[in-house]
Amino acid sequence: MHKLWISLALLLANSPALHADEMKKALQSYLDEHITAWVHDPILVMAIRAQNAETAGYDQAKIDELDQLWRGFVGVNDAEIIANVIANPAADFLRRQVTQSNGAITEAFVMDARGLNVAASVPTSDYWQGDEAKFLQTYPVGNAAVHISDVELDRSTQEVQGQVSMTIVDQTTGDAVGAITVGINLTELM
């Protein structure tokens, strides 16, 4: 495994555009083959719809206040704002998907129509994703929107990772309700 990591790091360093494209194809393939089967699950859709009803009237000042509160409690998983996101049935569902991936998925989280976290397998670094490409290039774009991040070497895990994000659609109504981001460990895929 260590040799694979070194090989991937060298590939990224020596011809980043070519290998980044190959890795993005691997991310898209994993999304198509493994993730799209469960992202529209009713447990996720219901959780997002419930939060959308709560957050629809939030202005940017309220969103910024919540994001700052979250950032202040990062690392304190029993803080109410974080516990509400990581300790709910939708978060349990996401953790099962991470576990069932056998190391291919590193994290998964869903966002409401404002880009606020609804459920997460593990705490994210911030609460509001609404100013990031993972949200801006999915939910606001439409039902079939997908965003694939740049591939990066995660220094803390020493793994080559990328994120795939897509709009979550309520299959019963056809309405876009939010978005999901899934972190994928490319070292496990290669």
Image (cartoon, rainbow, N blue to C red):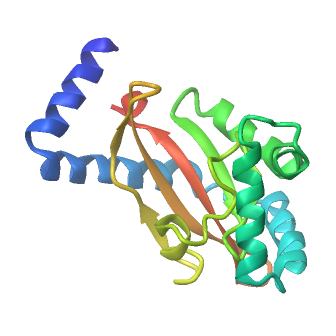
Residue 183: percent from the left, percent from the top? Answer: 52, 45
x 48%, y 75%: residue: 137
x 89%, y 48%: residue: 88
Residue 112 in sight: no
The reply, left or right, for residue 161 in relation to residue 138 is left
The N terminus - image quarter: top left
Residue 124: percent from the left, percent from the top? Answer: 65, 47
- Residues 76 and 129: in front is 76
Residue 187: percent from the left, percent from the top? Answer: 37, 29
The C terminus - image quarter: top left
- Residues 38 and 121: in front is 121
**Residue 83 lies in what quarter of the image?**
top right
Taking 34 as reference, is 129 above or below it?
A: below
The reply, left or right, for residue 142 in relation to residue 64 is left
Taking 70 as reference, is 185 above or below it?
A: above
x 25%, y 14%: residue: 3
Please state the total of marks drawn on the protein image: 0
Residue 51 in sight: yes
Taking 10 as reference, is 119 above or below it?
A: below
x 67%, y 52%: residue: 109
Residue 58: percent from the left, percent from the top? Answer: 81, 81
